[in-house]
Amino acid sequence: MKIALTVLTRLTGLRRFGHITRLGNITRGACIVSLLCIATLGHAQVGMRNLLSGDMPITLLYPTAAPVQPIIHGPFTIQAAPDAAPLPAPPASRRLIVLSHGTAGSTDNDHDLAATLARAGFVVAQPLHRGDNFKDFSKAGPESWLTRPGDVSESIDAIAKDPVLGPQLDLQHVGVHGMSAGGGTGLMMAGGQWRMLALVQHCALHLDEDIGFCLNGLAAHPLKQALRKGQFDLSRLFLTEENAPASMKTLQGGRSPNQSQDPRPDPRITAVSVAVPLGVIFTPDSLARIRIPVALTTAGNDGVLLPRFHSDKILQYCTPCTPLSAHPSAGHFDWLSPWPAPVAKAVAATQMRGGLPNPDFSAHERQQAFEQIAVFFKQKL
């Protein structure tokens, strides 16, 4: 039993390949500049720069007047103006959005949304989460969930030091967007708390229903599937709240009531958007304590994170969490910039269910949803 419990604590979660500015009290001269900036935003292009915070790469996207050009990153071609000068803006007038990718993800997969936000006037920081990205997903799952909130806060600190973009930003009103496991990151930044025991107990009871989550990434590994199933069977028979190891019951993510009345681990985060988020691991009590606005983009055809266990749970317990847009035909990976066919096929081969994009979900519908996310942040930040 002790060995089984030890193994259970090392279970990993999702695995996939990656990947009106407020004027305030400012001077008349600055106001004129700001109005010019807002007028220009309708024709803004997307600038792109790279930062390095320790060993964590951060991609920055922002509005610029420079023309974009195709940039080839492996199998992906994105459109941006590398190292371009940002559009001028009064000090502390722009808002920052930190974009958290999904498990084993990349910045390229989320480029279309990031570019949409940049054209809308935001600065977007895309950290490549340590140990959980397309180059290295050795810590994918719960081990990464422990460190992702720190990556978000570190990204804010890093851009604050940037001599060009830093002075433009109001870093007391920062947004976070995340997809899939990145959605879980967003919920943690809003104050949601999770524990390993919730994952294990959920999969012990609902393995066949939520197999896309519980056995994620194991489609090509039948022996690992059998081992994981056996572990969940053991937990259903023997694991209880009373005998579970303390490490499995420890609350992670947001702050507990005995720590602070504000559950956010970083009070600079004032609005969160999530798409097809990881949700089943969060405690109902912690979701109920969230006080900042959280918007959900959902996919009715999500086979990886079934809505009734994940998105629906968040909406059930979190009062400030509201549906932003619902898409009955969309699948889990339809929220990423479209993959080249060989990449899509390789990703699908790792998934137990729901690995391929849905051809009935159009690029136009996805872009409309991205525009709604931009509007949400304009309203809430």
Image (cartoon, rainbow, N blue to C red):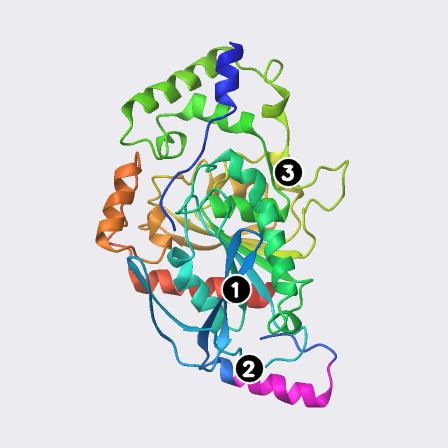
At 68% from the left edge and 51% from the top edge, which residue is drawn? Answer: 266
Q: Mark 2 points at which residue?
A: 38
Residue at which label 3 appears? 286
92 is higher (above) or lower (below) than 15: below
Q: Which of marks 1 and 3 is nearer the N terminus?
A: 1
CA gap, disc 2 and disc 1: 17 Å
- The disc labelled 3 sits on which kind of residue? Ser
Which sits earlier in the primary sequence, circle 2 or circle 1?
2
Q: What stretch is highlighted in magenta?
A: 26-39
Q: Which of 235 and 53 is in front in this view?
A: 53
Residue 168 x %, y %: 63, 74
As drawn, 169 above or below 203: below
Q: Specify whether residue 93 is in view.
A: yes
Residue count near mark 2 (Cα–Cα under 10 Å), binned few <14, some 14–19, many ≥20: some
Q: Are marks 2 and 3 in contact (CB under 8 Å)?
A: no
- Judge whether 20 appears above or below 131 on screen: below
The residue under label 1 is which amino acid type? Answer: Val
Compared across the picture, whether 133 is left or right of 321 comes to left
Q: What residue type is labelled 2?
A: Ile
